[in-house]
Amino acid sequence: MLGWRLADLLRTSRFIWPLSSGNVSRYSRKLRRSWIPEDSVPLASQIQVSFINMRSIYEIRERPSRMYSWLALLTSQILVEIPWNIFGATLFFVSWYWASGFQNDRAGYTYLMFGLIFPIYYTTIGQSIAAMSPSAEIAAILFNVLFSFVITL
C-alpha cells in the first residue's frame, strides 16, 4: 500500500507544477481532484487480499478454538490500517495539494477529507466487501462495481 502511494507521489510530482489562473489550469485542477478516488481502488484491492488470508486463518484455527471472536478480528484489521492510511495519505497530500497550486486557506479541510476520512472510508468498505466474498478475485470485482457508484456520484 505504501508503495502504491509512493508511485502516486512520483506520478503527481512529475505532472503537477504550480499553474496559472487560466481555463486550462482550472481543468487541470479538476482532473487532479479526480485522481484521489481513482487511486483508492487498487489500494483497497491490496487490503482485501490480506484480509481474506486472515479470515481463512480465523475460520480454520481460531473459530473452533474460540480464542477470540469475529468482532475482535474485524476491529484489529481496521485499526491496524489507520496509521498506514494516515501516513500514506499524508505523503500523497503534501506532494499533491501545493504542487497543484490550490489555495492555502482550504488546505486543512482538504487534508481532513482526503487525508484522514476518505482513506478510512474506502478501507472499511473494501474490508466489508472482502468479509462477504469467498475469494480475493470476487472481492475485487465486487469492490470495483460497488465503488464505481462512489466515484461517479
Image (cartoon, rainbow, N blue to C red):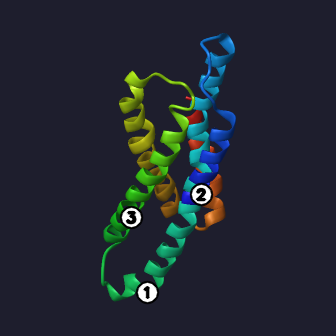
Mark 2 vs 3, N-terminal side: 2
Give the residue at x 61% y 41%.
Answer: 38
Secondary structure under tag 3 reads helix
Give the residue at x 59% y 59%.
Answer: 3
Give the residue at x 31% y 74%.
Answer: 69
Q: Nearer the viewer, mark 3 or mark 1?
A: 3
* Percent position of residue 13, x then y: 63, 40
Secondary structure under tag 2 reads helix
Q: Please say if the residues under marks 1 and 2 sit with CB atoms less than 8 Å apart.
A: no
Numbered mark located on residue 45 in the image: 2
Q: Please say if the residues under marks 2 and 3 sit with CB atoms less than 8 Å apart.
A: no
User: What kind of residue is marked 1?
Assistant: Arg
* Percent position of residue 84, x then y: 44, 58
Task: Report the Cα–Cα distance between label 2 and label 3.
Answer: 16 Å
Task: Report the Cα–Cα distance between label 1 and label 2.
Answer: 25 Å
The total of numbered circles placed on residues is: 3
Q: Is residue 7 left or right of residue 120?
A: right
Q: Is residue 86 left or right of residue 45?
A: left
Q: Is residue 113 left or right of residue 144?
A: left
Q: Residues within 10 Å of mark 1 (few under 14, many from 20)?
A: few
Q: Residues within 10 Å of mark 2 (few under 14, many from 20)?
A: many
Q: Nearer the viewer, residue 101 or 142?
A: 101
Mark 1 vs 2, N-terminal side: 2
Q: Nearer the viewer, residue 123 or 21?
A: 21
Numbered mark located on residue 61 in the image: 1
Q: Please say if the residues under marks 3 and 1 sit with CB atoms less than 8 Å apart.
A: no
User: What kind of residue is marked 3?
Assistant: Val
Q: Nearer the viewer, residue 54 or 16?
A: 16
For mark 3, what is the residue? Answer: 80
Q: Residues within 10 Å of mark 3 (few under 14, many from 20)?
A: few
